[in-house]
Amino acid sequence: MNKHPFFKRLLATLALVGMVLIVYLLWARPNQLRWGATKDEVTRPMPGDELDLTPTFLATRAITINGTPQEIWPWLLQMGYGRAGFYGYDILENLGSPRGIHSANSILLEFQHFKVSDKVPISPFAEDVFYAIQPIQYLIWAGQMKQNPGGFIWALYPLDKNHTRLVNRILWSHHWTRPGLLALELLTEFSDYLAIRKILQGVKDRVEGRIEPFYKSTVEFAIYLAALLVFIAALIIILARPFSRQRWLAGLGAGIGWLITWYTPMPLWGAALAEILVLIGLFRAFHRTSRRKMT
């Protein structure tokens, strides 16, 4: 009999987390840091790079929009919490906003006249500032820390008279010695990709005359959240219940399912199906192990 069952379960849980993190670092992270961007866009210097010369988080993402920089620019300038929103997962990003839960579907003239150093509200609890504004070309949000504040860069690169590349670059460094700030940064590390990808798609849709229904983005967000919660639940089960190989493998499946759901271009129905299969696997592993204990 194992005299230290909790220690064994703890080691199993840590091993599982470690394996999932390895898959994230080797596969998911390199891909999500350059979603939609070409090799030239990833390596090209951009205004604002000087905000952190040695970032530990550097992401360049891009999308092609059927529109001119002049048509795209107003949508970028008016973004912000309590302003036009972020055109993404409104159920989270606009929660409690005085302008309502929905991001703007039109140009808001009252949010078209910002200048450098003006605030950019990101949420009810956080804000950046406009570090640079070059009309029709780029705008940069920066943090408010004195050293390595990090930056959000939005830049427009015309392809031809009707098409433009919208490129976003995010750069900042982890604060490993500040636990409170590091926790937020780790959350950003994993979830930033989902938010930025949706913002880019939201800008594209508005410029091209399409508005995604609120229910669709909400369901999509719910599926992403469910994938993470299922993985967390699997870890709790492994840690709290008697150890079994079936539960551990089911937990590994939940972790891989979370990564696939978040970091592959899977259609909504495919993501939902993947999570259903993961739940079935967890239930079967739990039920099979419990039945063996009873017999």
Image (cartoon, rainbow, N blue to C red):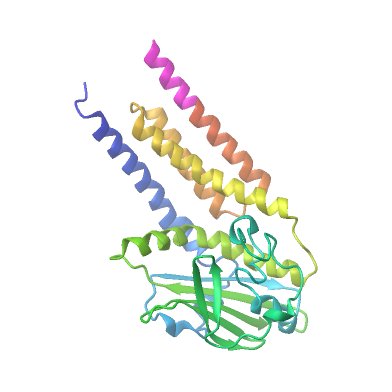
Percent x, y of residue 235: 40, 38
Q: Looking at the rendering, in which quadrant would you find the N terminus? A: top left
Is residue 48 shown to the viewer in this render? yes
Image position, residue 79 (x, y; %) = 63, 73
Left or right placement of residue 124 versus residue 4 in this view = right
Where residue 279 sits, quadrant-wise, is: top right
- Please report the residue visible at 44 percent of the width from the left and 76 percent of the height from the top: 150
> Compared to 259, does 244 lie above or below?
above
Asked whether, in this view, residue 55 is left or right of residue 210, the answer is: left
* In the rendered image, the vertical position of residue 211 relative to residue 237, given as above or below: below
Q: Is residue 294 above or below residue 157?
A: above
- In which quadrant will I find the C terminus? top left
Identified at 60% across, 46% down, the residue is 223
**Magenta range:** 284-295
Name the residue at 53% across, 65% down: 124
Work out which residue is located at the far left of the displayed protein and give it.
3
* Farthest-out residue, right: 209
Q: Position of residue 9 (x, y in %)?
A: 30, 34
| 245 sits to left or right of 48 | left
**The quadrant where residue 98 appears:** bottom right
Residue placed furthest toward the top: 295
Q: Is residue 39 visible?
A: no
Q: Position of residue 176 (x, y in %)?
A: 30, 65
| Left or right, residue 74 beside residue 16 | right
